[in-house]
Amino acid sequence: PVRPFPDDCELAAMKLTPAQVLTLRRLRSGTRYQLRGDRRKGIEVRFRMAYSDRADIACPSLAPLMRQGCIAFRIPARELTKYYEVELTARGLEAVNGEA
């Protein structure tokens, strides 16, 4: 079951951990992040240039950021087990600019 987003809560009431703020800042600067379709597991996409492959890093901050409405899927998630790219929402941009 997917929980609805808290649209009525104010931005000032959001409590962001340092890891979540860092994730939002990195997302703003262009780092690619992906979240599984069931919104439970997230990864940071990293490329190892020496080996020409990916070395993904777990990113547990994405799930709470999605629940708070700070990030959203770029395209609608259709399958629960596939990973989809995420992007900052207006609320996420306000949160990261307010923390800086």
Image: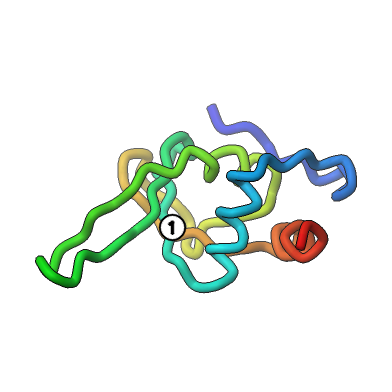
Q: How many marks?
A: 1
Q: Position of residue 35 (x, y in %)?
A: 43, 48
Q: Position of residue 86 (x, y in %)?
A: 50, 59
| Residue found 54% across the figure and 42% down from its top | 61
Q: Does residue 5 appear to the left or right of 55 in the view shown?
A: right
| Residue found 87% across the figure and 40% down from its top | 13
The image shows residue 88, relative to residue 40, as above or below, that is below
Q: Position of residue 69 (x, y in %)?
A: 69, 49
Q: Position of residue 99 (x, y in %)?
A: 78, 57
Q: Does residue 16 appear to the left or right of 40 in the view shown?
A: right
Badge 1 element: strand
Q: Does residue 93 appear to the left or right of 44 in the view shown?
A: right
| Residue found 40% across the figure and 49% down from its top | 78
Amino acid type of the residue that numbered disc 1 sits on in the rendered structure: Tyr
Label 1: few (<14), some or many (≥20) within 10 Å?
many
The image shows residue 22, relative to residue 18, as above or below, that is below
Q: Residue furthest left?
A: 51
Task: Look at mark 1 in the image and give the residue it sits on.
Answer: 33
Image quarter (top left, top right, bottom left or bottom right) of the C terminus: bottom right
| Residue found 44% across the figure and 37% down from its top | 38
Q: Quadrant of residue 18?
A: top right
Q: Does residue 9 appear to the left or right of 24 in the view shown?
A: right
